[in-house]
């Protein structure tokens, strides 16, 4: 028996089929419409006239103009030459007299812009043909700025922006200390400083041996990525012919900064071994020498140091100038009393140092004059004499005591410094290893 569906159910099924067909036709027509109309819409947008677009009124649009670029600033660097004045330097760049005179009589931090020192650096900042700023460096620590773009011109003093690296530097002696220092890429001035530090322990002209070694802990100052100068040597170790000498910079609580060995003894004795950096000893101390000028056998109660004209001559110790004079035999001569026992004399000078006169207080290592051949002399040299209780003595044979050692009350602080320095001289692993292999530590 076959069951036929009822008429109502047939009507219902046919209705659903019609709905599905209509829905399918509507979707198909919509898809065809989109495909046909889209290219025309894109073509219409591309061909649309921008002028025909609606733009809000000008009053309703916020237009922000980019700020103009500042005028370019050029920098001219110079060095003060003999005869230069602040007026001449600024006037040559077109600065009016009134602007120059407005700053000429002023001071900032004790610095007068009108007092220029030959050899010192200055900079001029120029914009649109006008000097806007002048900078002058009176020393290695400060820079004087004059701002001419202000009215009236303003003066200011700022520290020179250095980058400082604390570096241990080591080398081995082959021929000389200077060659050894240059061999590790450093400047001759470091060799001079090292020689001065150990002036009492090592005669760097006579006592050096091949294979001697040194290590120096020193601050190196850089500016704009370029090396400028060394700071004070903070510590040094020198091995000379198997003997190790160590110097540590330390300031006692109630004394001046000085160098001491690891036991706290001062490296600075009462007198330097020699008063200058000489080439050779041309004549030693003698009671019976044939004089090269007179041809007679006469005592030579001092030491002659052969050196180039103009070589600086230093006082071998602290003291007071007894006299400064010139005569036909000694030429230009200075005599210094160091204490109740010792005095020293320096003859045949080419010229005296500025500020040296009778009664002047001088310090060990201070320049008092310059090598020459004034008086009875056959060539440029220094005749150096020492006196003990008013009598001549051979400067190379006298026994001289050390200067003051570290006071007992400062020993704890000094011993801590010794341990710290030992780590740095040997290379503290906490320090950064630079690309060139030198240990460095940026201080500022």
Image (cartoon, rainbow, N blue to C red):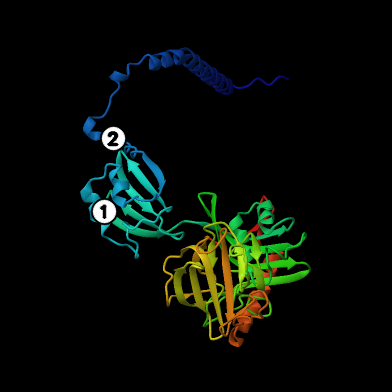
Percent position (x, y) of residue 200? 65, 72
Q: Secondary structure at mark 2?
A: loop
Percent position (x, y) of residue 125? 36, 45
Decide which of 377, 339 is in the foreground and name it: 377
Q: Which mark is residue 63?
A: 2
Q: Secondary structure at mark 1?
A: loop
Q: Which residue is mark 1?
A: 153
Q: How many marks?
A: 2
User: Is the residue 327 above or below the residue 75 in the image?
Assistant: below
Q: Is residue 145 left or right of residue 385?
A: left
Task: Classify the position of the N terminus by image quarter.
Answer: top right
Residue located at (33% from left, 49% from top): 133
User: How busy is the neighbourhood of tag 1: few (under 14 within 10 Å), some, or many (20 plus)?
Assistant: some
Residue located at (51% from left, 19% from top): 27
Percent position (x, y) of residue 231? 55, 62
User: Is the residue 393 above or below the residue 104 in the image?
Assistant: below
The answer for how far apart the CA atoms under marks 2 and 1 are is 37 Å
Residue located at (32% from left, 62% from top): 108
Residue 219 quadrant: bottom right
User: How busy is the neighbourhood of tag 2: few (under 14 within 10 Å), some, or many (20 plus)?
Assistant: few
Residue 429 seen by the camera: no
Decide which of 257, 70 is in the foreground and name it: 257
Q: Which mark is first along the chain, 1 or 2?
A: 2
- Look at the numbered discs 2 and 1 and tell me whether their residues touch, using CB distance below 8 Å: no
Q: Is residue 21 left or right of residue 128?
A: right
User: Is the residue 19 above or below the residue 72 in the image?
Assistant: above
Q: Nearer the viewer, mark 2 or mark 1?
A: 1
Q: Which mark is residue 6?
A: none
Q: Is residue 262 left or right of residue 377?
A: right
Decide which of 60, 5 is in the foreground and name it: 60
Percent position (x, y) of residue 230? 56, 59
Residue 338 seen by the camera: yes
């Amino acid at each position: 028996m076959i069951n036929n569906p009822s008429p109502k159910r047939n009507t219902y099924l046919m209705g659903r089929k019609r709905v599905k067909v209509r829905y399918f036709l509507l979707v198909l027509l919509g898809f065809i419409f989109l495909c046909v109309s889209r290219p025309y819409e894109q073509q219409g947008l591309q061909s649309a006239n921008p002028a025909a677009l609606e733009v809000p009124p000008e009053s309703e649009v916020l237009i922000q103009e980019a700020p103009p670029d500042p005028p370019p600033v050029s920098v001219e660097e110079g060095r003060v030459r003999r005869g230069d004045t602040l007026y001449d330097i600024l006037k040559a760049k077109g600065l009016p007299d009134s602007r120059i005179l407005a700053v000429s009589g002023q001071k900032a931090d004790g610095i007068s812009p009108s007092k220029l020192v030959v050899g010192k650096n200055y900079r001029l900042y120029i914009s649109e043909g006008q000097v806007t700023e002048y900078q002058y460096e009176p020393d290695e620590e400060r820079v004087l700025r004059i701002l001419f773009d202000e009215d009236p011109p303003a003066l200011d003093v700022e520290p020179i922006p250095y980058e400082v690296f604390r570096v241990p530097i080591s080398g081995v002696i082959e021929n000389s200390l200077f060659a050894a220092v240059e061999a590790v890429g450093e400047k001759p001035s470091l060799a001079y400083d090292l020689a001065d530090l150990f002036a009492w322990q090592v005669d760097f002209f006579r006592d050096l041996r091949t294979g001697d070694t040194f290590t120096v802990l020193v601050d190196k100052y850089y500016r704009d990525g370029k090396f400028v100068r060394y700071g004070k040597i903070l510590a040094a170790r020198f091995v000379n012919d198997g003997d190790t000498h160590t110097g540590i910079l330390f300031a006692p609580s109630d004394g001046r900064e000085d160098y001491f060995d690891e036991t706290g003894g001062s490296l600075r004795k009462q007198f330097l071994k020699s008063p200058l950096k000489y080439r050779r000893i041309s004549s030693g101390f003698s009671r019976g020498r044939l004089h090269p000028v007179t041809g007679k056998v006469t005592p030579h109660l001092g030491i002659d140091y052969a050196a180039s004209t103009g070589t600086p001559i230093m006082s071998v110790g602290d003291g007071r100038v007894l006299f400064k004079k010139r005569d036909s035999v000694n030429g230009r001569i200075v005599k210094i009393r160091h204490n109740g026992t010792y005095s020293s004399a320096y003859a045949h000078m080419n010229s005296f140092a500025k500020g040296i006169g009778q009664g002047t207080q001088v310090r060990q290592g201070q320049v008092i004059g310059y090598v020459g051949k004034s008086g009875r002399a056959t060539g440029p040299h220094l005749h150096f004499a020492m006196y003990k209780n008013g009598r001549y003595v051979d400067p190379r044979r006298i026994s001289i005591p050390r200067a003051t050692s570290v006071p007992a009350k400062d020993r704890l602080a000094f011993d801590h410094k010794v341990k710290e320095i030992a780590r740095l001289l040997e290379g503290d692993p906490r320090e950064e290893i630079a690309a060139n292999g030198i240990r460095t530590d940026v201080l500022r």
